[in-house]
């Protein structure tokens, strides 16, 4: 038998080669860039669509996913950090590879902007004349934005303590749009258009003029020289939808699309229409909007989730689609195969059921997957990160692994989640964490009373913000959960604030209304470590030692408190950042989580799970395993 024949389905879903939606160079559309795990680590790949040849661009122990093609298709820019710490510099190499253009340094890579020191990335835009606009963020400087002419030195054109980022360059490179939060609300950005010297051209700020807590987002300049129209996302009618703003003419054009959910869009390459992505109740679909007559035309996609889409110069649309039951596939409206990596194929999983439950803040939407057999089942509440994100009817290997092992899986789009209107997302203020747990508790009650969930075998789990809610839930709702499994969590909110990257400090000030010194009672009420002595359930924690989003010191503080009271817990530390891009590492992590749950719930262990890694900590002192590379989106 081959390894594939004996390999369990849950492992196959992680190992099966995946590809992202290819990004293509605007002036060389046959030059494309995508991300794949084909080698076992997620890395960047170049694709020459004329010849069909693909080439691996990056090769680093902990993977690489941040890259951008120059408009002429000659250069690939990629972000080089250290072991996932997200702090680094931009590198570049020729599209054709080392020596292909006679350019590039040793190995084909060279520092893209030698005059800029390492920082957290705050965006990148590349112009047609070779100009680059680079956004940087550091704890010392806040956000800075630099214009780098071809062969010239970086010139700083923007600086502010609050978070900001590079939005887009106009097609002719004359104008730059910046998303900024100078008003102090990191959840609702304003837009400023400047010239290449940083001179102000226009400002669009929906948080002012008597309208509070309305944000804007850059969707892109029109794809034609001399066209100063900018596609903007806004929330003026209580949901995300696009409008067209001409910052030079001072005009806006309201599109008012008659669709019930959140709406995003990008330009068709000829500038005559928009490719619209409509997200509603955890699913999405595509439309074409004609700017001349306002007509909406459906772009046919299967039921499920479109996680990325692009219109090609010939008018065809390529999109990355999946559902909870069906693995991701790259599709085209032309009917052609876009990219179909060879090798192992991911097995299907179970479809999701939609559940709506009355909660204290309104109806809560949850997605449920059931295993074979009759309930009640041991049940995993898999809580999404963000918090400004949402679970959807999309393929995910980790929930599918739980289902394979006999668990029902419930995913809750609590208040704070996107996709259900601005009021639902913005409800997450001041009582951070506690609001989400109220919604999770309402769905938990439904799961038990409906006969789905065994109340004696309830697992609360999640990564990033979901890991935070897991630890908080174990302390605030100690009688509700049998086990807790938290990956890269916020565990000690005050210490996390002081150690995390500057952009997340801005977000926390927005969510909680100030710093820990200004509103200490709010940080205390929302911090898992406040409730650690109330935790009853065994706890599993995994954390990245280089994580800038949920830093390791605050996790260690929480672990020390568990150890001091000799509470059963296990810990897994790994040498990467906010998650791992290495397939074997992800399989190891999921295997350890499954083993932990099956063992503590008294369920039979299936063969092929990861061998023991972390040591248990109960009556004795903890002995965590500091192993090689274990994932706040």
Image (tube, helix red, strand yellow):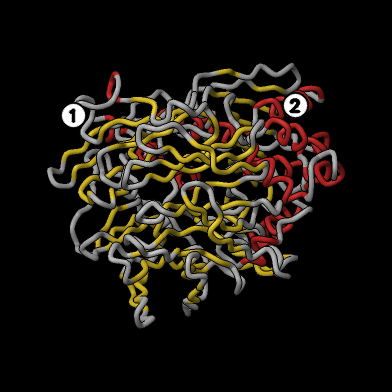
Label 2, secondary structure: give it.
helix
Distance, label 2 to label 1, CA atoms, is 51 Å
- Label pair 2/1, CB-CB below 8 angstroms: no
Q: Pointer 2: what residue? A: 557
In which quadrant of the rendered image does the N terminus lie? top left
Viewer-closest of 93 and 399: 93
At horizontal 41% and vertical 53% (from top left) the residue drawn is 174
Can you say whether 365 is above or below 510 in the image?
below
Residue ranking furthest to the right: 521
At horizontal 65% and vertical 57% (from top left) the residue drawn is 416
Can you say whether 519 is above or below 255 in the image?
above
At horizontal 58% and vertical 30% (from top left) the residue drawn is 547
Residue ranking furthest to the left: 51
Confirm whether residue 459 shows in the render.
Answer: no
Q: Pointer 1: what residue? A: 100
Viewer-closest of 196 and 599: 196
**The quadrant where residue 207 appears:** bottom right
**The quadrant where residue 595 appears:** top right
At horizontal 26% and vertical 45% (from top left) the residue drawn is 72
Q: Is residue 112 left or right of residue 87?
A: left
Q: Residues within 10 Å of mark 1 (few under 14, many from 20)?
A: few
Tell me where residue 467 appears, x and y as whole percent. 63, 41
Label 1, secondary structure: give it.
loop
- Tell me which numbered mark, 2 or 1, is placed earlier along the sequence: 1
Confirm whether residue 144 shows in the render.
Answer: yes
**The quadrant where residue 498 appears:** top right
Can you say whether 89 is above or below 517 in the image?
above
Tell me where residue 317 appears, x and y as whole percent. 28, 62
Tell me where residue 194 appears, x and y as whole percent. 51, 53
């Amino acid at each position: 038998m081959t390894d594939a024949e004996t390999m369990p389905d849950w492992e196959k879903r992680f190992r099966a080669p995946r590809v992202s939606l290819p990004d293509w160079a605007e002036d060389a559309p046959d030059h494309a860039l995508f991300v794949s795990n084909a080698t076992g680590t997620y890395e960047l790949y170049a694709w020459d669509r004329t010849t069909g040849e693909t080439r691996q661009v990056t090769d680093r122990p902990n993977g690489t996913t941040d890259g951008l093609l120059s408009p002429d298709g000659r250069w690939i820019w990629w972000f080089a950090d250290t072991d996932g710490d997200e702090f680094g510099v931009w590198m570049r190499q020729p599209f054709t590879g080392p020596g292909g253009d006679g350019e590039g340094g040793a190995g084909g890579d060279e520092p893209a902007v030698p005059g800029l020191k390492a920082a957290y990335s705050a965006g990148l835009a590349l112009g047609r004349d070779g100009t680059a606009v680079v956004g940087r963020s550091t704890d010392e400087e806040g956000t800075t934005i630099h214009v780098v002419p071809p062969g010239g030195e970086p010139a700083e054109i923007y600086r502010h303590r609050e978070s900001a980022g590079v939005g887009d360059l106009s097609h002719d490179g004359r104008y730059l749009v910046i998303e900024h939060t100078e008003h102090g609300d990191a959840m609702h950005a304003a837009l400023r258009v400047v010239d290449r010297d940083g001179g102000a051209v226009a400002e669009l700020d929906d948080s002012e003029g008597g309208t509070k807590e309305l944000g804007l987002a850059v969707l892109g300049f029109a794809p034609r020289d001399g066209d100063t129209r900018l596609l903007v996302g806004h929330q003026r009618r209580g949901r995300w939808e696009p409008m067209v703003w001409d910052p030079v003419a001072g005009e806006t054009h309201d599109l008012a699309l008659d669709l019930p959910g959140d709406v995003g869009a990008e330009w068709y390459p000829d500038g005559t229409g928009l490719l619209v992505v409509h997200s509603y109740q955890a699913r999405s679909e595509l439309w074409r909007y004609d700017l001349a007559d306002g007509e909406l035309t459906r772009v046919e996609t299967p039921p499920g989730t479109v996680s990325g889409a692009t219109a090609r110069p010939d008018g065809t649309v390529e999109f990355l689609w999946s559902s909870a039951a069906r693995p991701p596939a790259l599709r085209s409206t032309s009917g052609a195969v876009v990219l179909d990596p060879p090798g192992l194929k991911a097995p299907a999983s179970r479809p999701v059921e939609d559940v709506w439950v009355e909660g204290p803040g309104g109806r809560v939407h949850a997605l449920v997957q059931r295993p074979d057999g009759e309930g009640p089942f041991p049940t995993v509440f898999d809580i999404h990160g963000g918090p400004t994100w949402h679970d959807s009817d999309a393929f995910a290997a980790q929930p599918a692994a739980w289902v394979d092992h006999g668990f029902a899986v419930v995913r809750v789009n609590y208040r704070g989640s996107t996709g259900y209107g601005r009021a639902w997302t913005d409800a997450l203020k001041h009582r951070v964490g506690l609001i989400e747990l109220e919604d999770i508790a309402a769905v938990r009650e439904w799961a038990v009373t409906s006969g789905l969930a065994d109340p004696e075998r309830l697992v609360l789990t999640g990564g990033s913000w979901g890991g935070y809610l897991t630890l908080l839930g174990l302390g605030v709702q100690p009688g509700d959960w049998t086990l807790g499994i938290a990956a890269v969590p916020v565990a000690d909110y005050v210490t996390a604030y002081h150690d995390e990257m500057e952009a997340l400090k801005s977000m926390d000030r927005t969510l909680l209304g100030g710093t820990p010194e200004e509103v200490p009672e709010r940080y205390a009420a929302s911090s898992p470590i406040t409730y650690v002595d109330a935790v009853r359930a065994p706890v599993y924690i995994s954390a990245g030692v280089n994580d800038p989003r949920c830093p390791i010191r605050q996790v260690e503080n929480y672990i020390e408190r568990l150890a001091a009271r000799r509470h059963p817990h296990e810990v897994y530390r790994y040498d990467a950042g906010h998650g791992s891009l290495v397939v074997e590492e992800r399989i190891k992590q999921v295997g350890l989580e499954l083993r932990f749950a099956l063992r503590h719930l008294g369920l039979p262990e299936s063969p092929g799970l990861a061998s023991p890694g972390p040591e248990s900590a109960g009556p004795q002192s903890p002995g965590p395993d500091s192993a090689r590379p274990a994932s706040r989106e």
